[in-house]
Amino acid sequence: MEKAKVYFTEEISPESLVKIYKALGVNLKEKTAVKLSTGEPGGHNFLQPSMIKDLVSEINGTIVECNTLLKQRKNSGLELAVTKLLQSKYF
């Protein structure tokens, strides 16, 4: 069995995410989804849009929301609204 390649960076920045992508040596030609959680109300445990903007632009990607549907937000449309806001504001 071939050993897996592991990519690592100590720098966590928009530039380093693009650098890691380029190190993979792939060129994504099809539509590409970038799975992202916009977090929970009042929370801070998610990637800021400014952190992934360059990577999403580099691959001509589309943000796909992956939040957990909470009872208090069910049918509120909040996830869709936040995702649309992220796309329009940062991309």
Image: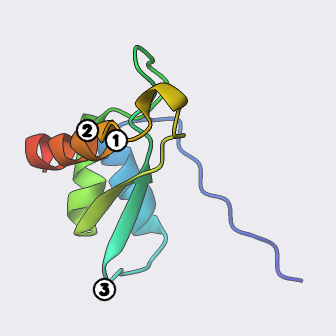
The mark closer to the camera, 1 or 3, is: 1
Distance (Cα) linking label 3 and label 2: 27 Å
> In this image, 56 relative to 36: left or right?
left
- The residue tagged 2 is 82
Mark 1 touching mark 2, by CB under 8 A? yes
Say what amino acid the circle numbered 2 marks.
Val
Q: Which residue is mark 1?
A: 79
The residue under label 1 is which amino acid type? Glu
Quarter occupied by residue 81 = top left
Q: Position of residue 24 (x, y in %)?
A: 49, 71
72 or 83: nearer the viewer: 72
Query: Taking 56 as reference, is 75 above or below it?
Result: above
Q: Residues within 10 Å of mark 2 (few under 14, many from 20)?
A: few
Colour treatment of the image: rainbow
Quadrant including the N terminus: bottom right
- How far apart marks 1 and 3 lie (CA) works out to 27 Å
Which of the labelled discs sits on residue 58, or is there none? Answer: none
In the foreground, 31 or 55: 31
Q: Residue at x 20, y 42 (%)?
A: 86
Using the image, determine if residue 22 lies above or below residue 47.
below
The residue that mark 3 highlights is 29
Whichever of labels 1 and 3 marks the residue nearer the N terminus, that label is 3
Q: Is residue 63 left or right of residue 10?
A: left
Q: Position of residue 35 (x, y in %)?
A: 44, 55
Q: Where residue 12 sits in the image (x, y, percent)?
A: 43, 35
